[in-house]
Amino acid sequence: MQEFHAQVIAAYGRHLTVRDEHGKLRAARPFGRRLNIVCGDRVRCQDDAHHSQVHVVEILPRRSALSRSTLRGAAEPIVANLDLVVAVMAVTPQPDPFIIDRYLCAASSAGMRALVLVNKMDLLGPETDRSALEGVLEAYRSAGYDTLCCSSVSPESQSALIAKLQGMTSVFVGQSGVGKSSLIAAVVPDVEIVVGELDRDYEGRHTTTASRLYDLPGGGAVIDSPGVRDYAPAVTDLEPRSLGFPEIDRLATGCRFLDCQHLREPHCAVRAAVENSELDARRYESYRRLRRLHGELLQAKGPARRS
Ligand code: GDP
Ligand code: ZN
């Protein structure tokens, strides 16, 4: 039996593709039911010569992970060892900034950087509400996020995006149809990426578990992770004071109560900032929704299993 270290570059349920230190790709399976292996993981493998099977026996410590919450409040990793979360929305379909916010909160609570990207700028028409889009982006910029408006079909956009991704491992997240696969195809040359198709599992059902890692020519990698509908961040990961909203975190130092939840408490600096328009009202509404979801998921998790 031979042992080696590898990186998981594709995960399709329990069907994995790993890449060893020499760059060789192998099909692999997790050994046992307990290992929750995701794309980006670094793993220890065993090569069973008799059955020509590769078993992943251990997940090496993760530098970071983007996780989601199950309906029962448990944390489930989606991708691992990331530096940057690229939250993608588009001129069409109608952007849902509340989903974007939840991904951003997960990113900042896990210590990853984030980029808010608006794709399909070529579809901006005279009827498009540009000021609404600009308002959404301005709120992200003043919160401290990097933003980029682009179009996966424009060469200038492609180089601007490549510059933002260079040297880092990134994941593209966002609603289905915003152009995540198209953007990845634009920055990773010579790979065939299926655009506009839902992933299906081996029984032909739609699945949200498939994800793949692509190397960037100048260093770094991007991971394509199909949209998780109604994404909810892992509740135990969220930073308790602000749930991962950076601008609320800064304001919260001015609240009277250390454990202020910025809902109905007196002398709350966060609510005061909404009232004098210092804090974007939509972002605050998003915070309130996430606070409610957070409470529900903690309850679903149950007091005994709360960590
Ligand atoms: P995903 O579901 O987020 O991976 O989105 P896809 O990459 O599959 O793209 C969804 C649809 O949007 C496809 O029909 C793409 O051709 C189209 N699309 C992607 N990027 C752009 C863009 O920048 N401009 C325009 N006009 N269409 C785009
Ligand atoms: Zn407060």
Image (tube, rainbow, N blue to C red):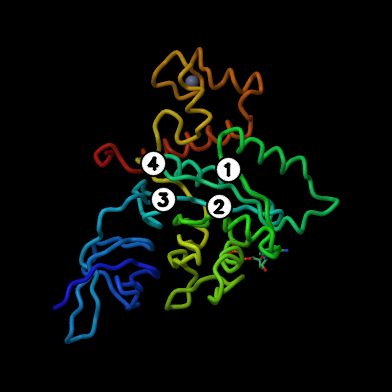
Q: Position of residue 267 (x, y in %)?
A: 51, 12
Q: Could you tell whether 194 is left or right of 130 in the image?
A: left
Whether residues under marks 3 and 1 lie with C-beta atoms below 8 angstroms apart, the answer is: no
Mark 3 residue's CB less than 8 Å from ligand 1:
no
Give the residue number, with chain letter if any, for mark 1.
146
Give the residue number, with chain letter if any, for mark 4.
235
Dividing the picture into quarters, in which one does residue 17 lie?
A: bottom left
Compare marks 2 and 4 and give the one earlier in the sequence. 2
Query: Which numbered mark, 3 or 1, is in the foreground of this view?
Result: 1
Give the residue number, with chain letter if any, for mark 3.
68
Looking at the rendered structure, which numbered label has been put on residue 51? none
State the separation of the CA atoms marked 1 and 2. Answer: 9 Å
Label 4 sits on what residue type? Val
| Quarter occupied by the N terminus | bottom left
Tell me which residue sits at (59%, 47%) in the image. Answer: 116
Task: Work out which residue is located at the far front of the displayed protein and give it.
Answer: 218
Task: Give the tally of numbered discs.
Answer: 4
